[in-house]
Image (tube, helix red, strand yellow):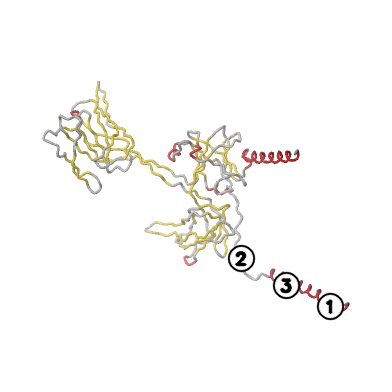
Amino acid sequence: MSLRIAAALVTLGVSLAAVAAEVIESPGDYAVTVPLTLSGEGPWYRVQLPMEAHLAARYADFRDLRVFNGEGERLAYSLIPGAERFAESQQRADLRLFPLRGPAGRRDAVPTLRVQRGDDGSIIELNAGAEASATADVLRGWLLDASTADFPLQRLHLQWSAESEGFQRFSIEASDDLDRWRPLGEGQIAQLSFNGERIDKSEVELPPTRARYLRLLWLAPEQAVSLSAASVSGTRSRAEPAALIWSAVLKGQAGEQGVTWALPLALPLERLRIEVEQANSLAPVLLQGRGDSTAPWTPLASSVLYRLPVDGHEVVQDQVELPQLPVSQLRLHVDSRGGGLGQGEPRLSVAMRATELLFLARGNPPYQLALGRADVQAGSLPVTILVPGFTPQRLESMGQAAISGRIPQVEVAAVVVPAKPGVDWKRIGLWAVLLVGVGVLVLMALSLLRASTKHS
């Protein structure tokens, strides 16, 4: 029983030691460490990982990436591959104006309309409805045609005049078909002057909304003002794909089948660039790739690279789109009928979509980014756990981190280019020695057999 208990304790101790070795990490456990400098408001900071980080990692999914603080503590982080950027731009659109009139004695009556629209949905003509009468000559409000605004409406700008100064209050409604209206609240404009000072308020904040039409109805119809112009403004947010990150020029090796380049690990490349240095150059090319040295070569793309004069200026085509398949080796075959790419080995760079690193700063600087460790588990958290209530738009307002210094470039062993098949004299010699040895053994066996026959 004591032996079993001892064995169980030894097993438990080994397990705990393994868990501790996994949890307790330090920057020294990683092949590459670079400092991070922080700017902006935290506690979350983001940094776009360069191509050198991909080439320095042991795994394409960055499972061996870590962030440490000055005390050597591991920090929580998330990886966002191909994170989109959201670019915002201020927009403004002028609106067409249509007065709304109703009965003078009915303050709660909403003017009825007969509308004629154009093919694009904009209003061509607007008249009072059948209920209008000769007394329907009181200005009740205004209909604004916002069909040209293709952005969320956030602010209303009015140019107006009134017989007397004061505050003007009105309700605001929105519609897409002029039949169904939804309330947006109330607005107020004002013109005041006293003792040589003047206040003009002609803008109204709107809850961000999309609508083809706005309706302004004055709460006191007898005070409805005359509008001479109106416009709306808002912010348009546009998602842009993650930036392409480029590698430095890679070293290749020329062979009979073309020029071959090797990466330290298989990456989903999206584009490559081959420098076309000489003027008036044109070269049809075929690009192949494979995930490792044991896999067959697969065609990736074919293109034509050139540097040519067109309409008085030089046009350069030196990039090739790739299907984003994970490849660790590339091979380029240049069609010699185009004259080639000039003297020397082609200079190649590769690119892929950037990955965003977002981490939660804790403790004291200096903060460090660590890469390059084998047999390690992924340490990235889902971004919705790292940042409660996360939305992609929040990335733009977070603090930024920058990699200080240069990430060392990993040296990749040269790709072995197979030589042209020929006569393998070494193999022939080995077979000859083997056959001679077998023949000697056969002769010895026959000699022994004859000797035993004579004795018998």
- Residue labelled with disc 2: 419
Residue 90 in which image quadrant: top left
- Residue labelled with disc 3: 432
Quadrant holding the N terminus: top right
Residue at the far front: name it: 1
Q: SS for tag 1?
A: helix
Q: Nearer the viewer, residue 64 or 302?
A: 64
Q: Image point 52% across, 50% down: which residue? A: 247
| Mark 2 surroundings within 10 Å by alpha-carbon count, few (fewer than 14), some (14 through 19), many (20 or more) | few
Does 19 appear above or below 220? below
- Residue labelled with disc 1: 450
Mark 1–mark 2 contact, CB under 8 Å?
A: no
Q: SS for tag 2?
A: loop
Residue at the far bottom: name it: 454
In primary-sequence order, the first of circles 1 and 2 is 2
Q: Image point 48% across, 62% down: which residue? A: 285
The residues bearing labels 3 and 2 have C-alpha atoms spaced at a distance of 24 Å
Does 436 appear above or below 132? below
Give the amino acid at mark 1.
Arg
Mark 1–mark 3 contact, CB under 8 Å?
A: no
Q: Image point 14% across, 37% down: which residue? A: 131
Give the amino acid at mark 3.
Ala
Q: Position of residue 455 (x, y in %)?
A: 88, 77
Q: SS for tag 3?
A: helix
In primary-sequence order, the first of circles 1 and 3 is 3
Does 337 appear above or below 88? below
| Mark 3 surroundings within 10 Å by alpha-carbon count, few (fewer than 14), some (14 through 19), many (20 or more) | few
Q: Which of 4 and 134 is in front in this view?
A: 4
Give the amino acid at mark 2.
Ala
Residue at the far top: name it: 195
Q: Where is residue 218 in the image (x, y as percent from the top left)?
A: 22, 31
